[in-house]
Structure formats: structure tokens, C-alpha cells
């Protein structure tokens, strides 16, 4: 057995053991990635904050520095209030609902019931559909002559027939429903993978203790998957918050009126349709801050329970 | 190290190739950006015209296309302009953001070119007026015009016991009720998009003299304008009396066009670009307008017409190639090329061409009908596209659903319209 003291490397000797040439080559090799990161990630973020301080009507128009003027304007802007409410409603309903449904479906899939492969393939479909294809599907579902109204008529419930995407009372509900449908698919597969990785001994032990599936799902699998659920929740929170722009743009364009406008949609709408680029970027900054705050909140919530 | 060098050189080569392809300018002498995409009926004619131009002059032309859905062509062009890579000419409709292009120096005003290129005798003065902004800039050269009448399916009207096209609002309401009774849908329109917006504003301006309508369309203030409110009340009355199809606020222009063309609905409002699609039911269709109202601004039913359907914008890049552009412009306005354009595409040039020739060349019964039935029987309402500011356009489309929704009273309707103008 060699003497332990003999193989301990003196601290002071460490730097001299890393050749400068090697350091340089590492830097050179990572330089393109760092340059890419700076140019396409950090740069736009800095630009976003700067643009939010400008009165800038359109890309072609000259801009003027107005400090926090755009943010002050938001305080009294009913459009922002409505969009913030819609975003909160969307995230507040989609994320918890998606977590519960996809966890339960994930547990079911982890049991590998008959037909589970088909189910996995079906669940993966929304991931494979482009946003525009999804929109086409749901325009067909919710249009005045679409699937929902046809079903209602068939069931003799014609009094409930309505243009779902064009009625102030139902359009946001449709956006939320599509959001849940879209979010559940991938999350279910993620949960199924996580639950399948729980030690079989733990599950067997719980069965010996008399646990049924309901108990195993909520008393065994759920606590073990809790932190993982936080990761899924965080990803979906970000996707719903930021990705709603596409969904709203393709399904309702924010209408009728502004009833389905969300903060993410407003970034586009205000910047490009209403020719207020600076104000739109200020909305984007608020959205960014909400996104970071939400991530911290979800992380804290799910860590606290671990 | 050799391996590193190999990968590095491969990376550099790939990067250089990519950068080179991005930075590469078009090899053509002229580049046209147009909203006439490959699916557009006029595109084959444009390709043919451009091919003929190159053959005659040796000047090569590249055509880039971008849909105008959601104002996409404006974004495409403005982005390319900022990058200094804009096309030399833009062929598009004058609407939305394009209304301010000359003011924002995104395009070169063509005031001086009209006469210098010999187009002052070709392009009518009223067409030039349509293309002139509030600062007096002629934004581009008007090329194609449109008519936008109301279409009445007289066969369906007769089935419902209505023997004549409604000439008053009361007759329209009575016709709608008769149609509903016969199981036929009355007036259909895309109540959630631009087509519904046009019909809505056509009805709303029924009591507004033209100048007043232009002012309200430009700046809003519907609730505060007595004549606009009369129009809003009229629209609400028509809606509540069941003149429009059920759930109209959820329909798109495609839904409405399909419903009319397949005989599901008896009345609609569609532009001349739909004449080609209407050939199948041409024998049943009478083209007219929205009925005139007592005490209104128009003595005859109203329709829309204008020279803003398509025109040529000269860009800053194009301003450096004026000789080539002059040749191309003179070529595309020549009678032979206009003939190619009219040929079975439904396009109507703004230049003074014999209407009978247009109808004959178009090979369209609907075009012939429009030439025969519209002149003298309808008045032109103020076309919103020329007056509604670009930043308001999309918000106004979204307000349309609210306007066409049952239960929303005149106060809510005018508020929704005014909301669209808020900055």
C-alpha cells in the first residue's frame, strides 16, 4: 500500500501542472460556443431591456429614450391588465391541471397496461404536430360548423351551439383547453419514465402493506416524483406563459376584442400590429420578470416539500 | 492537433459557406417582392409578363413572394429594408402599414415618375388620388382595381318568395326573414375577420357624408359622432332582426364565401377577386349594393371600389436602378401585358381599358355582370383600407366579432370600435 502522503498533490503545485497551451486550446475550442451564446442569447436580452426604455413606434421610425415611461404607462393600461389577467388565468389553470392529469396518466402508463405502446404513440402526437397544424385541428373543432357544435346538435343540445372561438365568454376557455391538451402529452411521457424508474422493491413493499393503486400513486409515487414534478411544472409554466402567443395568434388573434390577449401575445401585437415597438419590448421585460419569478416560486414550492 | 485543425477548418469552411449564402445578393438585375404567391391566380400571368420583359430587354428579374396574411409582406419588406437587402420593387395592396411607407421613407414617392414615365395619360387621376397620402406623396403606381359589391342569389330569394333584390333596409330585413323561413341562410360574411370589418364599416357609414366618414375612419370617435351612431344603430338593428346568419361573429371570409358559392346562404359581400369562383352560380347572381337608407349619405345602394388592390412601390434600392425600373413599369402597363394579366385571372387594371374587352378577356360571366349591373346603380362608399391607420387595422378586425355578436348594444359596439383606435 503506497503512502497516502506521497500521492497527495501539494495545492501550490496545481496551477503549474495545467499547461498554458492546453488552457488556450480549451478556450479556443469553446470560443465559438461562447461567442454564439453572447451574440444570440445575451445580446438580444440586453437589447430587449434597452429597447423597453425607448419610445419607438416601428422598426422604420426613429426612437427616443424615455426611461421608464413605458413601464409607467402599463400601470394604467387596461389592455395590459386584461392580458395579465388572461395570462394568470391560463397558467393558473393549465399548469396544475396538466400536472395532475399527466401524473395520473404517467402512473397508468408505467404499469404497462395492454395497448400502452399505442397510447404512448397517441400521446406523442401533439409533440409531432406543428403549432399551425394544431391550430388547424382546433379551428375545425371549435368553428361554428365544427366538431363541438356538431356533437351538441347530434345530442339535441342545439341551444348550447356557439362560435366558441369568437365569443367573449368561451374563447379564453378554448385557449386554455387546447393548452392543457398540448401540455399533457409530453408531460405524461416524462412522468411515466420517472415513475417506471422507482425501485420495484419500494412498490412491492407498499403492496405487501396493502396499498392499492390509488395509494401507491399518491402516497408512494407522488412523493418520490415530487421534485421531478417541479421540473415538469417549471417547463410547462414557461411554455404556457411564453408559448401562448402562437396559440392565441393562430386561434383567435387576441379577439374577440382583446378578450384572449395574453402578455406573450401582446409583445407581438403591440410591437408589430400596433406599431409600438418600445412598449412591446417593455411588455416583454415584464413577461421575462414574471417568468423568472414564477420559476423561482415553483422551484421553492417543490423543493420545500421534498 | 491535426484532428483539431481538421475540425476547425471544416467549421470555418461551413461558416464561410453559410455567411456567403446569406450575404449573397440576388444575381438578377431587378428583384420584385409581391404578395402574389404561387397560389394566386394572377401569379402565372406575372411570371409570363416578366419572362417576356427579360426576353425583350435582357434585364433579368427575380420574383420573391410573401403572403399578405396578417400583414406579413409589410414585416418581410421592412425587415429586409433595415438589413439593406430590400427588393427593388414591391407589388402589393395599399393597406395597413403600407399606407405610411412613403412617410417613413420606406419607399420612394413616385410623384415625379408618373408623368416622366408617360403614365399620366394611362393611369386615371382618381386612381392616383387613392394612392396619395396626407402629405401629398404618391406612394406607388396603381396597377389593379377592384369592385366589391353585394351578391344576391336570386334563385334562392325566389325560393323564399322574394322576387326582387332588396332596395331598402326594410326589404332586406323582410327578405332575411323569408329566407330563414324557407330554411335558407340570409346574409353571410366573415364576422371575425377583414371581410366582416368591411361590411360593418360599410353599414356604419350609411349616414356619414364622405368627408365625415374619412375623418371617423382615420381617427375613431364613433360613439361621439351622431351620424356614426345612426349607422351603428342600423347595424345593431339588422343583426338583431336576424339579417346575418347565426353565429356570424365566428365565421371567416372563407366560410362565408363557401356558404354563398354552395347555395347555403343567399346574400354576401365579396370582391371582384371572387368573380372567378362565382362562375358556377353566375346565372343566379345579381350584383348590387347595401340598400340606401332614408336620410342617409347615399341615394343609391353602396358598394366599394378602389384602385388599391395592387400597385408598384419603388424602394430605395430600386431608386438606384430607375432606368431598368422605368423599362419594366412601361412594359407591364402596355396593353399586351395587361391583356395577359386579365386573361382568366379576374384582375381589373386601373388603366382605361374598354370594359367589354376586360370582360371578354377575363372569360368571366361575373365580370361581364359587374360591368353591366354596377355602373349607375350603386354609389361607392368610403373604402376603409385607405383611411384606417395601419396600427388600428388588426384591432378593428378583432372588434368585428363583438359588433356581430347578439346582445351587444350600440354603446358596446361603438366602444369596441373606439377601443381599436386607442394608442
Image (cartoon, rainbow, N blue to C red):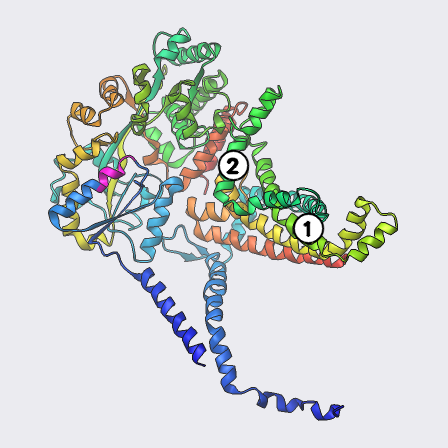
What residue is disc 2 on?
A137
Percent position of residue B147, x then y:
28, 27
Q: Is residue B395 left or right of residue B336?
A: right
Q: Is residue B83 above or below residue B304?
A: below
Disc number at residue B221?
none
Quarter of the figure with the N terminus of chain B = bottom left
Residue A2, placed above or below residue A111:
below
Quarter of the C terminus of chain B within the rendering: top left
Percent across and percent down for residue A237 are 62, 51
Numbered label attached to residue A192: 1
Q: What chain does badge 2 belong to?
A: A
Which one is earlier in the sequence, the residue at label 2 or at label 1?
2
Within 10 Å of the Cα at label 2, are there few (<14), some (14-19), or many (20+) other Cα atoms?
Answer: some
B54 or A122: which is nearer to us? Answer: A122
Marks 2 and 1 on same chain? yes
Is there any visible trace of residue A252 in the rendered image?
no
Please provide percent x and percent y for residue A212. Answer: 83, 45
The stretch in magenta equals B41-47
Amino acid at each position: 500500500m503506497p503512502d497516502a502522503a506521497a500521492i497527495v498533490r501539494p495545492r501550490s503545485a496545481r496551477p503549474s501542472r495545467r499547461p498554458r497551451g492546453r488552457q488556450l486550446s480549451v478556450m479556443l475550442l469553446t470560443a465559438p460556443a461562447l461567442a454564439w451564446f453572447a451574440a444570440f442569447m445575451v445580446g438580444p436580452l440586453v437589447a430587449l431591456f434597452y429597447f423597453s426604455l425607448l419610445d419607438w413606434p416601428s422598426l422604420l421610425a426613429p426612437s427616443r429614450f424615455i426611461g421608464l415611461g413605458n413601464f409607467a404607462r402599463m400601470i394604467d393600461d387596461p389592455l395590459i391588465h386584461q392580458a395579465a389577467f388572461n395570462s394568470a388565468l391560463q397558467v393558473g389553470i393549465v399548469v396544475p391541471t396538466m400536472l395532475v392529469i399527466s401524473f395520473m396518466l404517467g402512473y397508468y402508463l408505467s404499469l404497462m397496461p395492454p395497448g400502452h405502446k399505442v397510447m404512448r404513440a397517441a400521446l406523442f402526437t401533439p409533440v409531432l404536430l406543428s403549432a399551425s397544424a394544431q391550430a388547424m385541428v382546433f379551428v375545425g373543432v371549435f368553428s361554428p360548423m365544427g366538431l363541438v357544435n356538431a356533437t351538441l346538435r347530434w345530442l339535441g343540445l342545439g341551444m348550447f351551439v356557439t362560435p366558441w372561438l369568437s365569443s367573449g365568454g368561451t374563447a379564453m376557455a378554448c385557449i386554455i383547453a387546447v393548452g392543457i391538451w398540448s401540455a399533457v402529452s409530453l408531460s405524461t411521457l416524462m412522468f411515466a419514465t420517472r415513475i417506471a424508474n422507482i425501485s420495484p422493491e419500494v412498490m412491492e413493499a407498499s403492496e405487501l402493506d396493502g396499498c392499492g393503486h390509488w395509494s401507491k400513486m399518491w402516497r408512494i409515487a407522488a412523493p418520490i416524483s415530487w421534485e421531478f414534478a417541479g421540473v415538469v411544472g417549471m417547463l410547462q409554466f414557461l411554455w404556457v406563459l411564453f408559448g401562448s402567443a402562437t396559440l392565441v395568434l393562430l386561434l383567435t388573434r387576441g379577439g374577440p376584442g382583446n378578450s384572449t390577449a395574453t402578455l406573450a401575445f401582446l409583445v407581438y401585437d403591440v410591437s408589430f400590429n400596433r406599431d409600438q415597438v418600445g412598449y412591446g419590448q417593455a411588455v416583454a421585460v415584464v413577461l421575462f420578470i414574471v417568468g423568472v419569478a414564477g420559476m423561482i416560486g415553483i422551484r421553492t414550492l417543490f423543493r420545500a416539500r421534498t | 492537433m491535426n484532428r483539431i485543425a481538421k475540425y476547425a477548418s471544416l467549421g470555418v469552411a461551413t461558416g464561410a459557406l453559410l455567411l456567403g449564402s446569406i450575404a449573397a445578393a440576388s444575381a438578377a438585375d431587378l428583384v420584385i417582392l409581391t404578395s402574389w404567391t404561387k397560389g394566386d391566380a394572377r401569379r402565372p400571368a406575372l411570371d409570363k409578363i416578366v419572362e417576356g420583359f427579360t426576353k425583350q430587354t435582357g434585364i433579368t428579374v427575380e420574383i420573391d413572394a410573401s403572403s399578405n396574411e396578417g400583414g406579413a409582406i409589410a414585416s418581410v419588406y421592412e425587415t429586409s429594408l433595415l438589413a439593406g437587402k430590400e427588393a427593388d420593387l414591391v407589388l402589393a395592396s395599399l393597406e395597413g402599414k403600407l399606407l405610411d411607407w412613403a412617410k417613413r421613407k420606406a419607399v420612394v414617392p413616385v410623384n415625379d415618375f408618373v408623368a416622366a414615365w408617360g403614365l399620366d395619360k394611362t393611369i386615371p387621376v382618381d386612381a392616383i388620388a387613392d394612392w396619395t397620402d396626407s402629405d401629398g406623396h404618391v406612394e406607388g403606381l396603381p396597377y389593379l382595381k377592384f369592385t366589391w359589391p353585394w351578391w344576391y342569389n336570386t334563385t334562392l330569394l325566389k325560393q323564399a318568395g322574394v322576387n326582387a333584390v332588396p332596395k331598402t333596409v326594410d326589404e332586406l330585413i323582410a327578405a332575411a326573414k323569408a329566407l330563414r323561413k324557407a330554411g335558407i341562410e340570409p346574409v353571410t360574411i366573415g364576422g371575425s375577420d377583414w371581410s366582416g370589418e368591411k361590411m360593418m364599416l360599410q353599414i356604419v357609414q350609411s349616414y356619414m357624408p364622405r368627408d365625415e366618414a374619412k375623418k371617423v375612419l382615420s381617427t375613431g370617435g364613433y360613439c361621439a359622432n351622431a351620424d356614426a351612431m345612426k349607422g351603428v344603430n342600423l347595424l345593431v338593428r339588422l343583426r338583431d332582426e336576424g339579417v346575418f346568419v347565426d353565429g356570424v361573429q365566428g365565421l371567416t371570409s372563407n366560410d362565408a364565401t363557401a356558404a354563398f358559392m354552395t347555395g347555403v346562404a343567399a346574400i354576401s359581400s365579396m370582391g371582384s377577386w371572387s368573380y372567378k369562383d362565382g362562375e358556377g352560380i353566375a346565372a343566379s347572381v345579381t350584383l348590387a349594393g347595401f340598400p340606401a337608407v332614408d336620410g342617409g349619405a347615399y341615394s343609391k345602394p353602396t358598394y366599394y371600389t378602389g384602385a388599391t388592390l395592387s400597385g408598384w412601390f419603388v424602394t430605395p434600392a430600386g431608386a438606384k436602378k430607375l432606368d431598368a425600373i422605368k423599362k419594366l413599369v412601361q412594359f407591364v402597363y402596355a396593353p399586351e401585358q395587361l391583356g395577359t394579366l386579365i386573361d382568366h385571372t379576374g384582375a381589373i387594371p386601373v388603366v382605361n381599358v374598354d370594359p367589354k374587352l376586360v370582360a371578354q378577356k377575363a372569360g368571366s360571366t361575373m365580370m361581364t355582370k359587374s360591368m353591366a349591373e354596377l355602373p349607375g346603380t350603386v354609389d361607392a362608399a368610403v373604402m376603409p383600407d385607405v383611411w384606417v391607420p395601419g396600427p388600428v387595422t388588426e384591432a378593428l378586425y378583432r372588434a368585428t366579432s363583438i359588433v356581430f355578436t347578439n346582445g351587444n348594444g350600440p354603446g358596446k359596439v361603438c366602444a369596441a370600435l373606439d377601443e381599436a383606435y386607442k394608442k
